[in-house]
Image: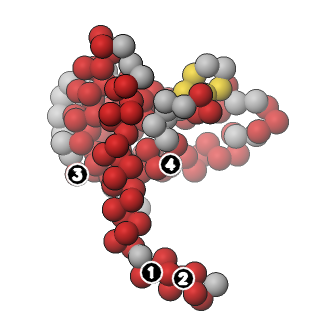
Amino acid sequence: MRQLRELLAGTVSLQTRFIVDRMEAALPKILAVLPPAGQEPVRRQFYRAAAEPLGVYGLVDYVNFKGEGVSPSERYRGEGWGLLQVLQGMSGAAPGQAALDDFSLSADRVLRRRVANAPPERNEERWLAGWLARVRTYRTGPL
């Protein structure tokens, strides 16, 4: 356990680079699965969130927390729960706190829908309160 802690503590910058790289690679993956007409609204919402420091945190955290939303394994009943679905659920255009609120509220809706669509035997409701607390930090910052 001590060696594992030392390894993790000694590689924080590498771990950070990995999660940021994943976020940066997410948008091209997302756009590749969309028809041309659906790409610009999603791109706009991605950059609307990314324009805010907490938005970058939210994008990085969400894609590493729940994925891009492009894989069939990221769906229940045909509805996904990844970053793609969060971006598609955003509707605003205002920058600043409004963008953070829009991103966080969309993530909240997507995760609630995931739980509602999950097979009952998965009992995903047990995680929902923690997930929702996590996505609220996209509006206010990490606790």
> Quarter of the image containing the N terminus?
bottom right
Few, some or many residues within 10 Å of mark 3 (<14, 14–19, 20+): few
CB within 8 Å, label 1 to label 2: yes
Q: Which residue is mark 3?
A: 53
Measured Cα–Cα span from mark 1 to mark 3: 24 Å
- 127 lies left or right of 91: right
- 39 lies left or right of 129: left
Q: Which residue is mark 4?
A: 65
Q: Which of labels 1 and 3 is toward the front?
A: 1
Measured Cα–Cα span from mark 2 to mark 4: 21 Å
Q: Which residue is mark 2?
A: 5
Residue beneath the point at 58% across and 33% down: 74
Name the secondary structure under disc 1: helix
Name the secondary structure under disc 3: helix
> Quarter of the image containing the C terminus?
bottom left
Counting residues from the start of the chain, the first of labels 2 and 4 encountered is: 2
CB within 8 Å, label 2 to label 3: no
Counting residues from the start of the chain, the first of labels 4 and 1 encountered is: 1
Few, some or many residues within 10 Å of mark 2 (<14, 14–19, 20+): few
Name the secondary structure under disc 2: helix
Q: Which residue is mark 1?
A: 9
Q: Could you tell me residue 97's position as x and y percent? A: 23, 40
- Res 41 seen here: yes
Q: Could you tell me residue 9's position as x and y percent? A: 45, 80
Residue beneath the point at 70% across and 30% down: 118
Residue type, label 4: Phe
Image label count: 4
Counting residues from the start of the chain, the first of labels 2 and 3 encountered is: 2
Q: Could you tell me residue 55's position as x and y percent? A: 28, 45
Q: Could you tell me residue 34's position as x and y percent? A: 38, 19
What mark, if any, has residue 75 been given in the picture?
A: none
